[in-house]
Amino acid sequence: MIKGKDRSKQEAMDMLHKVLQRGDTVYTVLRHVSKSGMQRRIDCYCIGEDRKPFFLSGYISKVLGLRHDYKKGGLVVNGCGMDMGFHIVHSLSSAMFRGPNGEYSHEGTYALKHEWI
C-alpha cells in the first residue's frame, strides 16, 4: 500500500497519463522572474479533449518535486542560461515515459513537445 507523498505522487502521475499522450504539447507561461534572474515561476497547460486549457502545474509539482507558488503563480524553477520551460517539459516527459523496466529512455525523454504561450 502506498502512503503519504508517494500516493499523492502516484495519483498525480496517473492523472498526467490520462491527459497527456506521446506527441502532445505542453504549453508554458512565464509568470514571474526574480530580480536576480536566477529564479522563475512557470505554469504548464495542455489542451484537453474539450479544446479548453487544462492546468497541469499542480500535478507536475508533485511528480517532479517542484514547489508551486500559489501567491505569484507557477512552478518555482531555479537557474538560468537555458530554456527553463523546456527543462520542465523535458523532465516531465522523462518521468512519465520510462523504459519497460523503469529505466531512463531517450525516446521517452522527448515524447512530449513544448511551446511557450
Image (tube, grey):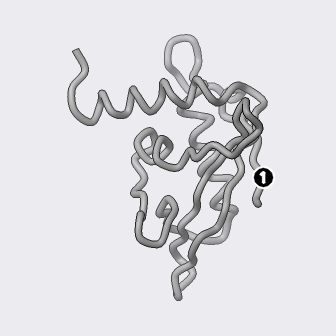
- Considering the numbered disc 1 on the image, is that residue within a helix, a strand or a loop? strand
Extreme front residue here?
A: 50
Q: Residue at x 50, y 44 (%)?
A: 60
Q: Is residue 14 above or below residue 38?
A: above
* Residue 62, percent from left and from top: 40, 42
* Residue type, mark 1 in image: Glu
Q: Residue at x 51, y 12 (%)?
A: 101
> Pointer 1: what residue?
115
Q: Is residue 54 above or below residue 14?
A: below
Quarter of the figure that contains the N terminus: top left
Crowd class of label 1 (few under 14; some 14 to 19; many from 20; radius 10 Å): some
Q: Residue at x 72, y 36 (%)?
A: 112
Residue 111, visible in the rendered structure: no
Q: Is residue 112 above or below residue 14?
A: below
Image label count: 1
Q: Is residue 97 above or below residue 50?
A: above
Q: Residue at x 73, y 26 (%)?
A: 22
